[in-house]
Image: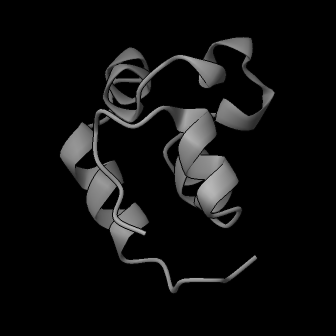
Amino acid sequence: MRFTKDMSIFEALTAEPSARAVFESHGMACCLCIGAQSETIEAGAILHQVDPEVVVAELNGLPEGED
């Protein structure tokens, strides 16, 4: 799975459950946020004052299929 900054947070979490750890490591409690279903990774990162490119790079570095 290739993550992009335009992907919704919910889509990222659904595609790769271990993405939760990446979001949480940046102070993004996205799995608990109602906005995660429609908010993009970029919008969530900016909201939490995190560089979206860093988050996307870390997501794309996750081993596929890790839970």
Total marks placed: 0
Q: Is residue 34 above or below residue 53?
A: above
Of the pair 66 and 48, the residue shown nearer to us: 66
Of the pair 54 and 17, the residue shown nearer to us: 17
Give the percent coordinates (x, y) of residue 31: 74, 36
* In this picture, residue 66 sits left or right of residue 54: right
Q: Which quadrant of the rendered structure holds the C terminus?
A: bottom right
Give the percent coordinates (x, y) of residue 55: 35, 51
* In this picture, residue 2 sits left or right of residue 51: right
Give the percent coordinates (x, y) of residue 2: 34, 64
Q: Is residue 12 above or below residue 10?
A: below
Image-quadrant location for residue 3: bottom left
Q: Residue at x 51, y 86 (%)?
A: 63
Image-quadrant location for residue 29: top right
Give the percent coordinates (x, y) of residue 13: 64, 49
Q: Is residue 9 above or below residue 20?
A: above
Q: Residue at x 74, y 14 (%)?
A: 34
Q: Is residue 55 above or below residue 34?
A: below
Snapshot colouring: one colour
Q: Residue at x 25, y 53 (%)?
A: 54
Image-quadrant location for residue 7: top left
Q: Which quadrant of the rendered structure holds the N terminus?
A: bottom left
